[in-house]
Each structure stands twice: as structure tokens, then as C-alpha cells.
Amino acid sequence: MTAPPRHPVTADQLRPGDPYELSEGRLVECLPSGRRGGPRNGTGFGVLDTDPLAEAAAVDLGVSPRPEMLHAPDIAVGPIPDEPGWATEAPPLAVEYADTGQDEAELHSKIDELLAAGTRWIWVVRLQGARRVEVYEASSSARQKAGGAQKTRRLPARVAYPGEALVAPEVLKNPVLVKALYDREAAHEATLRNLLQRRGYEDIEAVREEGHTQGLRTAVRDLCEVLGIALSPEREAALEAMTGPELSSLREQLKRQRRWP
């Protein structure tokens, strides 16, 4: 829009792309991310979006549970309908990246309003100084008042450092290493694990193990063909059910006895 509307403002007066958030009807200017913050947002998004339990993830999702509130967490994770307009429910997990020049008062106002609206966890990734993540969570009594305009009572922030992991039960399946929210290599490892789990593999070792097992199964079939051993449907079923060690043992027996044991 060419000029901001006069106060008080409601969310329906703003459009996607407008450089503002809304706090109690007051416009809050949102500036572009810097060279350090921008890439980190994408890094964290990839990890969270691919988690096997994550329903959806979004960058800068407009969240407006009530007309006088509109916030856009750097990353939001939870049920996000594929529909036009602002999200009317706060995401259960939100991530914010804070770097040099961060307006701390506005950040904490945003944290309070999202927690009061129903967000369960807010992870603030600090990019200035020692890398760390501040974890904010509403108290149980505050959650019961979610949706009101009042300030929420939040639990004291917990600070997690590299080497530690963050959890969001019922929202994410896997713990998220602090480093995976800002380090590209750590994020790639976590993303690969998540994608493998979405395909039924627990991790890369499970893929290697399946490849090894399939190789043994093929070797047994080839050996049976060389020895002239017919593979009946029953034997094929047995082959498919065998584990890697069982297939290795069968292969050795075929080599020695030249017959199906």
C-alpha cells in the first residue's frame, strides 16, 4: 500500500506484502532480513518443513486470531490451511531470528501476543554473539486465556546452546539440534534424516542396510540359477522374509551343499 492507514488499524486493512505487522491496532514496521538472517530463515524452514510429523510450515505467515493483531513469524509450523487470507489460528510452533539491530521491545510484545493467542513454543534464534536459542512457552493458566487481548504469563525463557536439542511434542517428531536452525551443513543432515523417515527409513544407516540386504537377496537368486535350484513361490516368500544375516548364511550353505537346505 502507498501509505499506512491511521490508527487504530485492523488486519483486514493490510494486504500480503505490506511491510507491517499489527500489535493491538498499532502498526509495526517489518524490514527485510539482512545477509546473515535471510539465509538462516531458509535453513531452519527446510528442517522443520520436512519433519515427518509437521503438518505444514510457512515463512512469514500472517497470523491474525483477532482483528487488531497481525504477526508474521519468520517460520510457523502447524496446521496451515491452503486458503487465501490470514491464518486465524496461532501456529503451535513459531521461530524468530534475531540479529544486530533487533527491536527487543517489539520482539517480546510479539512473543507475548502469540503465546496468548495459543502458540505453544517460540524459538528465538540469536545470530549476534554466541549462537543460542531462547525458548519461550506460555504457562498453562495463560493458555486457557488464549485469544484475549491481555498480556500472557510466560514461563522463564530457557536458553539452549549448540550441542543441545529442542523438542515440540505432537508438532515435530524429531528433536531439532540448535545448530540445525542456523548452520547449513547441520540443517542438511537433519533434512536428509527427515526425508528418509518420510519414506519409511529411520536414517541413512537403514538405507545402507536395506541396500546390503537386497544385494544378498540378489546374490542368492543368482546362485540358485547357477546351481539349477528352482525357486518355488514358497522359497521366494522365504527369501523376501529373510534378514541380512539369514541371507548371508543361506548363501554360504548353498555354496557348500549346492542345494537348498
Image (cartoon, helix red, strand yellow):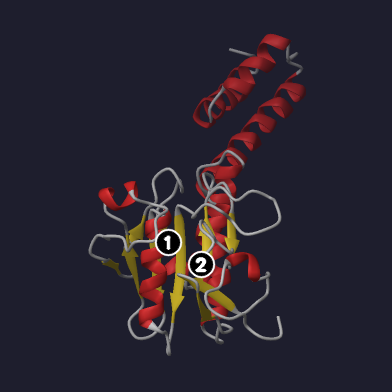
What amino acid is found at the position of numbered circle 1 in the picture?
Answer: Leu
Asked whether the viewer can see residue 163, the reply is no
* Residue at image location 32% in from the left, 58% down from the top: 137
Give residue 29's mark.
none
- Residue ID at (52%, 84%): 36
- In the rendered image of this protein, does residue 167 appear above or below residue 123? above
Q: Quadrant of the N terminus?
A: bottom right
- Looking at the image, is mark 2 or mark 1 earlier in the sequence? 2
Q: Position of residue 256 (x, y in %)?
A: 58, 22
Camera-nearest label, 2 or 1? 1
Left or right: residue 55 compared with residue 157: right
Towards the viewer: 220 or 134 = 134
Which residue is under mark 1?
114
Q: Are marks 2 and 1 in contact (CB under 8 Å)?
A: yes
- Residue at 57% x, 46% y: name it: 55
Name of the residue lying farthest toward the left: 156
Q: Tell me the crowding category of disc 2: few under 14, some 14 to 19, or many 20 or more residues within 10 angstroms, Cα based.
A: many
Tell me the CA gap for discs 2 and 1. 9 Å
The answer to whether residue 65 of the structure is visible from this angle is yes
On the picture, is 33 further left or further right than 227? Answer: left
SS of the residue under disc 1: helix
Q: Residue 216 placed where, x, y %? A: 62, 33
Q: Position of residue 78 (x, y in %)?
A: 52, 50
Q: Which residue is mark 2?
A: 73
Disc 1 residue crowd, few under 14, some 14–19, many 20+, Cα 10 Å: many
Q: Quadrant of residue 138?
A: bottom left
Q: Callout 2, which amino acid?
A: Pro
**In the rendered view, would you say 222 is above or below 46?**
above
Q: Quarter-wise, where is residue 87 in the image?
A: bottom right
Please report the residue visible at 26 percent of the width from the left and 53 percent of the height from the top.
139
